[in-house]
Amino acid sequence: MSKLAGFPGGDGFCPVYSNHIDSSLLLSLAPHVDVYLPPRKRSRISGPFLFQGDLFEQPKPVTIDVLPDECLFEIFRRLPAGQERSACASVSKRWLMLLSNICREEFYSNKASPALKSPEASVVKTKEVVPLVNDKKGQVDVSDAVSKVDDEEIENDGFLSRCLKGKKATDVRLASIAVGTCSRGGLGKLLIRGSNSSRGVTDVGLTAIARGCPYLRDLSLWNTPAIGDEGLVEIANGCQQLTKLDLCQCPLISNKALIAIAKNCPSLTALTIESCPLIGNEGLQAVGHFCPNLKVIFIKDCPLVGDQGIASLFSSASYVVSKVKLQGLNISDVSLAVVGHYGKAVTDLVLSGLQNVSERGFWVMANGHGLQKLKSFTITSCGGVTDLGLEAVGRGFPNLKQFCLKKCAFLSDKGLVSFAKAARSLESLQLEECHRISQFGVYGALVNCSLKLKSIALVSCLGFKDVNFQLPMVSPCKSLHSLSIRNCPGIGDATLAVLGKLCPQLHHLDLTGLHGITDAGFLPVLESCEAGLVKVILGGCVNLTDKVISVLARLHGSTLELLNLDGCKKITDASLVALAENCQILLEAAIA
């Protein structure tokens, strides 16, 4: 047996018999001394090991993303519609854009889904969401491109509807819509309002819609400066069922795109062009020639549009167009003559800001005998509106029911009375900022108007002078039910008393902003109304007192449903008490 080794004063070493312990746990200190050390945990190596040579080189991970676009295209075109395509589109922006640019005809299975065959089956109320991931290479966050498309989804003859506004209008979202809606019945209506300042909508996004949404019927582009002819040409080639096109503030779209739309979309029924400086006569000629079903035409602030384009458009679609608006165009009397001759189906006509049109143009249009079905006519800021032209309008449009004149500086009382005598079907007349019209013209119009006139509105007309006038023995206008006089400072008690005698069957009375009327002028109106007032608006009539409100409540409390007294400073609690006691069916009251 070996000798024991002793070490005074130390506890770190333990003397043991060398032949009883595993030699791997012993540390030799001397030829005849063995020391035992307890086992310890091996230290974890956190730092990387560097090796030279190919022996320890790690293989690179294999990924499908290394495939070129041509191979991915062949893979994607074999995917079935629905969740499979949406799942692939959620991988990256690259895959999304590849999928969105594959035409429907290029997919391996060219069979239409049941949702596309049956409009009833394509009504989907659950919004599809394709959660895309961040594309680190492009530094573009597309993770919520579809989930944040809060854009409206409504039922529209079995199709889906989308609306992108402001910063949410990007090419990525359009691509997501093109992929996500293809299996949900198809996109039928797309509205883009504004554009993202940094990543706005371009021809790329519109191309994705054109290739993935062949059933698009309604397209509206507002304030999209980056969209040009290329995107709209793709829409023309891929969405040939388009029926409505609305272009507003699209500076890069020209006649080329409009011609493509006209040739490929013969079902077009509504066309709106506003502030598009590159669209002119050539595009309108193509629309008139290739779109025989066009019914609605709105053209505003397009400097290249002239008489030639308007003439070609109306001469080709003369028996179909029903609603027309021409505003801020460089057209002359020739265009009005063409409209008056060929507008046989026109029912609504708006002419605004036509500075080159004269009195002769309105006279020729009225005597063209083409606008026999015209029912609503609005003229704004046209210097050619004179007494002679207005009389011709009254005679030439026998079915005219609603007539509105705004900012017509050369129209006088004589022309208004002549028009009232000639327009035998007139039901509504509105005059706004016609400063040569006075109370005598209004009196004459009421006396000589047709038995169908129901409404007259006078807005901001400064030609009224409140003078005492003895009304001769004339028949009152018993057909008039609505009288609105707003912000006409010259109207006072004398004028209002005469109007009350001429209009005994009023139901609606609006006297907003008439600071000159008092109780003395308003009381005769209340006493003359035989049918009972239903709606009374007296906002800003600062001189009316509790006396007239009490009479109103007592005489018309059984019929009064709406009363507005905003700004009537002399009205107190006494008026409220009278209204509470007499107006049992009052639904709405405004007092401030």
Image: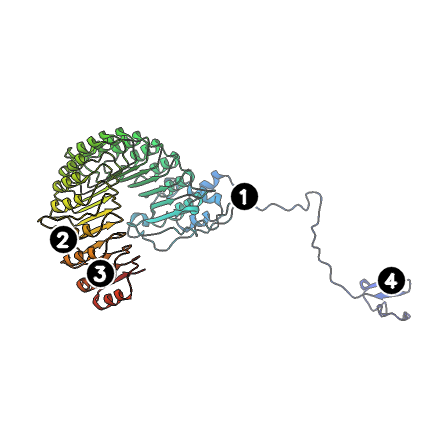
Q: Secondary structure at mark 1?
A: loop
Of labels 2 and 3, earlier in sequence is 2
**Quarter of the N terminus within the rendering:** bottom right
Q: Which residue is mark 4?
A: 28
For the residue marked with disc 3, what is the amino acid?
A: Val
Give how far apart the Cα atoms at labels 2 and 3 are. 18 Å
For the residue marked with disc 2, what is the amino acid?
A: Lys
Q: Are marks 2 and 1 in contact (CB under 8 Å)?
A: no
Tell whether 94 sits left or right of 501. Answer: right
Q: Which residue is mark 2?
A: 501
For the residue marked with disc 1, what is the amino acid?
A: Lys
Q: Secondary structure at mark 2?
A: helix
Nearer-the-camera pick, 283 or 64: 283
Q: Which residue is mark 3?
A: 548
What residue is rendered at 15% in x and 44% in y? 445
Q: Which residue is mark 1?
A: 137
Q: Secondary structure at mark 3?
A: helix
Nearer-the-camera pick, 151 or 247: 247
Residue 359, image x and y in percent? 20, 32
Of labels 3 and 4, earlier in sequence is 4
What residue is rendered at 14% in x and 54% in y? 504
